Image (cartoon, helix red, strand yellow):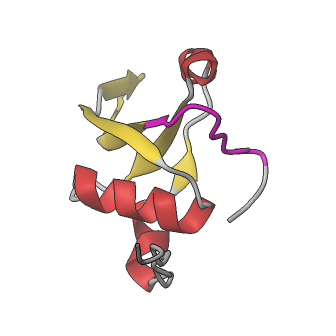
Amino acid sequence: MAAKKKEKVEVQEWMYEIIREPHVTEKATMGSEYGQVTFRVPLTATKPRVKAAVETLFGVKVKAVNTLILKGKTKRFKQNHGKRSSIKKAIVTLEEGQTIDVGTGV
């Protein structure tokens, strides 16, 4: 039997653009109990690209990626009207035994 070679995937610039920042909220931290980490990603990000970026940048195995788009709200303060921008979140579920410390930088 031939030994399997581990493929070395090089970090590319687009990977840093996909994973913008960790999204730290009460609900997101409750997901860490189940091996989930939540990231903010661009609106154009796809699940396979998010998976590839997380696996390469953090050196972990990803089990699943779920995405959701949070639509921007219209806000008003006295006579001023404004609109929050829409954001996309990616909830990444990691394999058993894998962890990502979101407190440290990439």
**Residue at 77% of width from left, 45% of height from top?**
103
- Residue 17: image x %, image y %? 43, 70
Q: Is residue 17 above or below residue 74?
A: below
Identify the image quadrant of the C terminus: bottom right
**Residue at 35% of width from left, 56% of height from top?**
50
Front residue of 103 and 42? 103
Is residue 84 among what the camera can see? Answer: no
Front residue of 83 and 64? 64
Asked whether 94 falls inside the magenta stretch, the response is yes
**Residue at 45% of width from left, 79% of height from top?**
7
Single out the residue that lies furthest toward the right. Answer: 104
Q: Is residue 99 above or below residue 49?
A: above
The residue range painted magenta reads: 93-103
- Residue 24: image x %, image y %? 62, 32
- 34 on left or right of 4: right
Q: Quadrant of residue 13 in the image?
A: bottom left
Q: Is residue 33 above or below residue 92?
A: above
What secondary structure characterizes most of the magenta part? loop
Q: Is residue 79 above or below residue 4?
A: above
- 51 on left or right of 29: left
Identify the image quadrant of the N terminus: bottom left
- Residue 90: image x %, image y %? 38, 40
**Residue at 33% of width from left, 39% of height from top?**
65
